[in-house]
Amino acid sequence: MTQAPLKIAVVSQYFFPENFIINDIVRELSALGVHVEVFTGKPNYPSGEVFPGYTAHDAVEDRFAETIAVHRAPLRPRKKGGAKNLILNYFSFVANGVRYFTRHARRGKFDVYFVFAPSPIISVIPALAMKRVHRAPVFLWVQDLWPESLAATGFVRNKFLLSIVGLLVRALYWAVDVLLVQSRAFIDPVKRYARADKINYYPNSYLQQEDFGEVCKLPESLTDLLCTHFCVVFAGNLGSAQGLATVVEAARILQDEGSQVRIVMVGTGSKAQWLAEQKLTWGLDNLVIAGAYPRTAMAELFELSAALLVTLKRDEIFSFTIPSKVQAYLAAGRPIIGCLDGEGARVINDAGAGVTCPAEDGAGLAACIRSMQAMSQGQREQLGTQARAYFLKHFELKAQCKALVRMFEQRIEQDKTTL
């Protein structure tokens, strides 16, 4: 008798066409024979406006990768940000998720509820409501530390309010069955609010370049730059967490030396305009603001780069996390320059993938770039080879999804033996 496939309900406020790792995980789980359904909101990140083809109101169902059902609850878009808009966005997903998703839990009888949880942590509440309708273990994949991230970003400064959020986090962690943390450094902070035996390390993974499908070509002007200069490429969000003032400081130091180095910033974000203004203010010819390109262009971009750059602000909470671009850079098999603290720097160093310096150390970043430029081509290729090997061992998406399915199955069997 053929065993019925696992039925997994993935609950996430963010999903395709928004660009998050959960999209690739859902696709791969389905490829492994798991029956997956997604419960999410209306796509509106990062622009703040609901994407074309969707409306903020009405619950709808569409398909992802042709066969995967995606249930979308009404959601108030985040608009241009700000505390009021974000709070309304967060709570609209919770309220409408509880209202609409529980109907499917009653009919679907899922084996596991799997919650992808970047901010806000309260996005787990609809899954807990589904669990009340039909009992199944809830796996919460913690991507962001609350209340620490609220304090670090300045979103909440009042100590009393932070303590209230801490109590909420404790209650939510208590209610779920398994806590997955994307960084080993998350374990101790999460243990302040949950039992240690609930916590498992499950890192973010990354889809390999060859699995992206259709390839988008870079413009000729950018490829010419990459081929004729020593280009250190930053690819990703240009936001306040990235500590971009450090990049400007390093560019100023290197500009004075008249080197062939170009620091190429690829992406967009809240600090993109500020970065462009700094380039003009200081006359930084060696700082290139290249704009944003689709994910399918990253293979060519990374391949033509002399080295890849990751930076973060100096803050304890940022030292706990591994920026997702680190996995992308490792997968590309290119040397890495890291200007960050903690877990992200540890991974780069453990992999033997490049050179690092402390967060917000502009002089240190300039020195790292100099040292990378001074290496022979063979030495840089060796760093890239080591980066790729480390990625395949620790972060490759297909292997990580198989490990996730094993965790689901083990928990289901454990629950059966305790009944």
Image (tube, grey):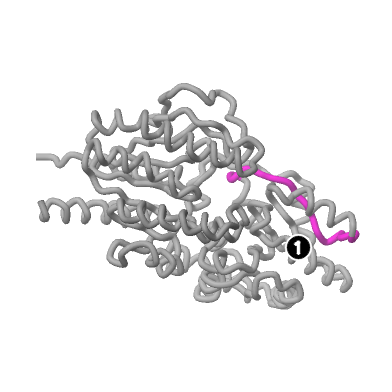
Tell me if residue 337 comes above or below residue 29 in the rendering: below
Residue 326 locus on image (x, y percent): 55, 62
Residue 11 locus on image (x, y percent): 38, 41
Label 1 secondary element: helix
Residue 125's quadrant in the figure?
top left
Crowdedness of circle 1 by 10 Å Cα count: few (<14), some, many (20+)?
A: some
Residue 165 locus on image (x, y percent): 47, 54
Residue under the image location 64 percent in, 43 percent down: 82
Tell me if residue 309 comes above or below residue 419 in the rendering: below
Residue under the image location 47 percent in, 68 percent down: 390
The amino acid marked with disc number 1 is: Ala
Q: Which residues are magenta?
A: 282-296
Q: Nearer the viewer, residue 415 or 172?
A: 172
Residue 388 locus on image (x, y percent): 51, 65
Residue under the image location 72 percent in, 55 percent down: 265
Residue 382's quadrant in the figure?
bottom right
Q: Is residue 218 left or right of residue 180?
A: right
Q: Nearer the viewer, residue 154 or 213?
A: 154
Q: Is residue 379 left or right of residue 109?
A: right
Q: Is residue 332 visible?
A: no
Q: Nearer the viewer, residue 18 or 67?
A: 18
Quarter of the figure with the N terminus: top left
Residue at the disc numbered 1: 245
Residue 94's quadrant in the figure?
top left
Residue under the image location 73 percent in, 46 percent down: 291
Q: Is residue 297 visible?
A: yes
Q: Is residue 23 magenta?
A: no
Q: Is residue 233 left or right of residue 40?
A: right
